[in-house]
Amino acid sequence: MSSYAEKFRIRKSGSVLKEQDKKKIHEAALEVMEKTGIKIHSKVARDSLKKAGAIADEKTLIVRFPKSVTTDLIKKVPQKIILAARNKEFDLPCDGEHIYWTTNGTGITVWEQETRTARKSVLEDIRKSAILGDWLPYVSIYEPMVVAHDVPPKIHVAMGMKEAFNNTRKHILSESTHTPEEAKTQVKMAAEIVGGIEELKKRHIISAMVCTMSPLILEGPATDAAMVWAENHVPVYITSMAMMGMSGPATIAGDLVVNHAETLALAAAMQAHEPGSPLFYGSVLTSMDPRTGAYVPGSPESIVLGVTSSEMARYVKMPSACGGLGSSAKEPGIQSTLENSIGAKFSTTIGVDVMNGMGMVGGDTMLSYEQLIIDNEIVGSAVSSQKEVPVNDETLAVDLIKQVGIGGSFLGTELTAQKARDFYMPLLFNTDPFESWVAKGKKDFLDIAREKIDWILKNHKIEPLDRNVALALDRIVKDAM
């Protein structure tokens, strides 16, 4: 395993839900799937499910799932996945012992710190954020972070992915795929990089997000895209976004039931279509603001929904992914830092395979380069605080304690010289004494973030794709126009 992946290893997770509560939620979702059903607009998915024993009404498009059918199908989901990268050193084993972090997508605006205004996002923002994500040590997975308004809508997904492939060596998550045609284009691009479709099925250098439509709907083109991903063994994050009190019940347990039913339905459809196709039980659940009905991703309820949905993923033995960062704050600063810190720490304590959301504010709609740097700091601190604590002769250091004795110092010892290198060192937050901070200009952490952004973009150079591969990607994008 690469040393990079070791950075994200955490100690054994805790739990919020009792085992009997997970069972109740699971059985409630199975009852909803069997009695009420799921409306599935994809004929490809319906046909595959009918062959597996589900009951589909072609007039209403409602599919009902006998419990035995759901249970048999979801058993086919691989329990472990390796998210591969362009450079193998960044490969990520999803095995329940690590927690990885993605950038957020796909924003429609970009925060400008100097003028405190927002502007429309462009393709250059994908290039810059990919470079930053490649450099930042705690960005594990890069997701194209914005919609490129300067690119024709028909190819904005393909162009965003091409820019990502060119500017990061890490695993890439595609979020904004809405049609099977877009999925096929991205499969062709990824296959060019790894050396063909069969190699892509073994080496998952891309993954994809497919959203359900709450409550209890699998939308047509997106579900058709999921079938394309399944055929090519591209891992899919099945992402329900049920909002408490709006598109889900106004209780955490009820919202989890809706989420569980939708997730199992699409998981079953994928396994009926392509047994053994990899997927994540991926949820971005939130509460609403009871005063306005607004989406509130940083609320305490949203944070609890995120970690408890990951517990439901473990209950059905699926890899988990959930939203946990992505503040509703209108700008980077105190609110976004507080909300994301709570979400990050809670998630590492419970243990999620993949956490989504770095670098966005405004309810996941606005890219902030400063927030991306701040979130890297938050994640680094959260992961470091959840490391296993080794207890052995070396770490107990009894002989050394005796040697140093009462009132001595451990500063000059070899153990300190070796182990201090493992201490978490903040990239952004200032730990200097007050006088030193004053002497250095009393810089605000947002000012320091901006300086770090400028330095990374100027100095971090990434080896480009092979020229023939780059030309092949250009042809694929052109064909998609």
Image (spheres, grey):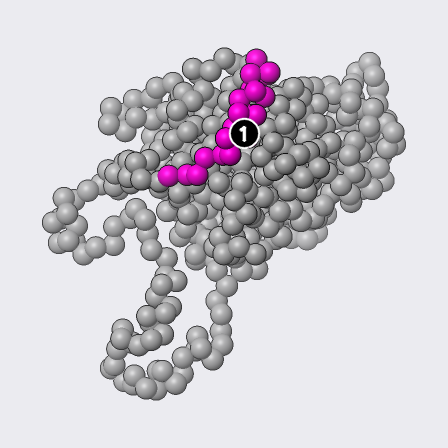
Q: Quadrant of the N terminus?
A: bottom right
> Residue at position x 30%, y 77% from top?
413
The magenta segment: 461-481
Q: Quadrant of residue 257?
A: top right
Count all numbered tags in the image, as a single digit. 1
> Residue at position x 11%, y 49% from top?
439
Provide residue 147's location: percent of width, then percent of height: 47, 21
Q: Per the image, is 438 magenta?
A: no
Provide residue 270's location: percent of width, then percent of height: 74, 33
Provide residue 408's location: percent of width, then percent of height: 25, 81
> Residue at position x 33%, y 55% from top?
425
**Most foreground residue, 120 or 294:** 120
Provide residue 340's location: percent of width, then percent of height: 42, 41
Label 1 Cα neighbours within 10 Å, binned few <14 / some 14-19 / many ≥20:
few
Instruction: Say whether residue 42 is left or right of residue 424.
Output: right
**Most foreground residue, 72 or 31:** 72
Q: Secondary structure at mark 1?
A: helix
Q: Is residue 232 above or below residue 6?
A: above
Q: Is residue 128 above or below residue 9?
A: above
Is residue 136 visible to the viewer in this orientation of the structure? yes
Q: Main secondary structure of the magenta part?
A: helix
The residue tagged 1 is 468
Q: Quadrant of the C terminus?
A: top right
**Most foreground residue, 273 or 69:** 273
Q: Per the image, is 471 magenta?
A: yes
Is residue 295 visible to the viewer in this orientation of the structure? no
> Residue at position x 73%, y 19% from top?
41
Q: Quadrant of residue 176?
A: top right
Residue kind at label 1, given as amino acid type: Asn
